[in-house]
Every structure is written in structure tokens, then in C-alpha cells.
């Protein structure tokens, strides 16, 4: 299933950006069911447009996750930098604003948010000492990123209601550049770095 964002600006208005969703059962087991979402939010544009899309994303996630029951993962290019600056991976004020708009507002000011909708873990930040790693090499640059300089706009969030036999495997969240074969005109498949992590079904 999918939903298209109702509000967009500029060339993004022609892109039909939104959210994709699928429900996955590991090994076909009901107790190891998870809802998987991926999204691509407005590039640039106003805060009003971004917040509108974040609100629509939260509504869709909440609806599909059995009205707040179950486990979920939300990944994608949020186009909202979680790093304080290009050289500072400390989580930014805009990152916490984003969680607030999503209804996943943190109570402790760290990278684990415990809001009224979901308990949330930012997998990349948690497995990176609490800092957001670089996930974007810059627009149109298909090369390996400088790990110390750049933006962190791609996320892997684990939404948990502690209601299944699923768990995440600690320290497996990495940003994977997916390098191409030698001789290709580009070094990586995208100018964004993929978010990769592992989940475990504890029912087997």
C-alpha cells in the first residue's frame, strides 16, 4: 500500500513523493510480524510543507501498525539533517523538531524517543555512540562519503510496542554505500548511503 503526500513544493510537486508500506512475517510466524515503511520527503521547501508531510507520515504509520500496536521500521530519505553541522554529528534541534511533528517526541533529549505514539529507536544514532553519521555525499556525487563531513538525512527508525517476538540486533546498524564494480563511471549506486541493520525473530 502507499500514500502520496498532499502538500509539496517546486519540482518535488511532480515527483509523487510519499510512503510505501508492507507487512512482513518472518518465517511466516504471526508473532514475528513487522510493518515496514519507506519514505522520501520534500527536498528543500518550507518548514510548513515538511511538517505537513511528517504529520501525514505519522498518520499512515499509526493506521497501518494496528492503531499503535505492533512493531515497525521506518526508513528513507527524510531530507532533514540529523547532524548539528557537517562536521558535528550531535543530534540537531531540527531532528528533535522532526520527532515532535511525528508524535515521537523524546522525553530525555537523547536519540531514543518515547512519545505518546510509539517507542522509537534511531538505529544509526544508537549504534554510533549517540551521534548521527554522514549518509549523504552531496547532490549528484556518486562516491564514497567523507565519514566526518556531510549531512545525515537518511534514517532507520525502529518503532516498538514490545508486543512481538521480534528484537533488533544491537550494533548492526551501519550506513552502507553499496559500491559498484570497478570500471563503472560512478563509485556508488546513489548519492545517499543506504541504512542497513538486522532484526531477529526470537520465536524460533
Image (spheres, grey):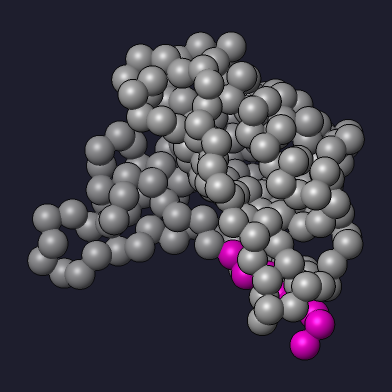
As drawn, is 202 to the left or to the right of 191? right
**Residue projecting furthest to the bottom:** 204
Place of residue 44 in the rendered image (x, y in percent of width and height, measured from the top left): 43, 20
Range covered by the magenta-colored residues: 197-204
Place of residue 21 in the rendered image (x, y in percent of width and height, measured from the top left): 58, 50
Res 20 visible: yes
Instruction: Locate the C terminus and report the quarter of the image it occupies.
Output: bottom right
Nearest the eye: 41 or 195: 41
Q: Residue at x 64, y 60 (%)?
A: 23
Res 86 visible: no
The answer to which image quadrant residue 68 occupies is top right
Q: Residue at x 53, y 62 (%)?
A: 196
As drawn, is 40 to the left or to the right of 50? left
Magenta-colored segment: predominant secondary structure? loop
Place of residue 19 in the rendered image (x, y in percent of width and height, measured from the top left): 54, 40
Residue 125 position (above or below residue 28): above
Residue 184 covered by magenta stretch:
no
Amino acid at each position: 500500500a502507499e500514500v502520496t503526500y498532499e502538500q509539496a513544493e517546486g519540482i518535488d510537486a511532480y515527483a509523487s513523493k510519499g510512503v510505501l508500506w508492507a507487512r512482513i512475517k518472518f518465517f511466516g510466524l504471526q508473532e514475528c510480524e513487522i510493518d515496514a515503511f519507506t519514505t522520501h520527503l520534500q527536498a528543500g521547501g518550507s518548514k510548513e510543507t515538511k511538517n505537513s508531510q511528517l504529520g501525514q507520515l505519522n498518520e499512515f504509520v499509526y493506521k497501518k501498525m494496528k492503531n499503535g500496536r505492533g512493531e515497525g521500521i521506518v526508513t528513507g530519505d527524510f531530507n532533514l539533517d540529523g547532524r548539528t553541522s557537517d562536521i558535528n554529528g550531535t543530534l540537531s534541534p531540527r531532528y528533535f523538531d522532526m520527532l515532535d511533528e511525528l508524535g515521537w517526541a523524546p522525553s530525555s533529549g537523547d536519540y531514543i524517543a518515547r512519545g505518546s505514539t510509539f517507542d522509537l529507536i534511531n538505529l544509526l544514532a544508537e549504534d554510533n555512540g549517540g551521534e548521527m553519521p554522514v549518509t549523504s555525499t552531496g547532490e549528484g556525487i556518486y562516491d564514497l562519503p567523507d565519514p566526518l563531513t556531510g549531512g545525515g538525512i537518511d534514517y532507520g527508525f525502529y518503532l516498538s510496542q514490545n508486543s512481538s517476538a521480534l528484537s533488533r540486533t544491537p550494533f548492526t546498524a551501519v550506513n552502507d554505500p553499496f559500491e559498484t564494480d570497478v570500471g563503472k563511471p560512478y563509485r556508488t549506486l546513489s548519492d545517499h548511503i543506504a541504512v542497513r541493520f538486522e532484526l531477529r525473530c526470537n520465536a524460533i
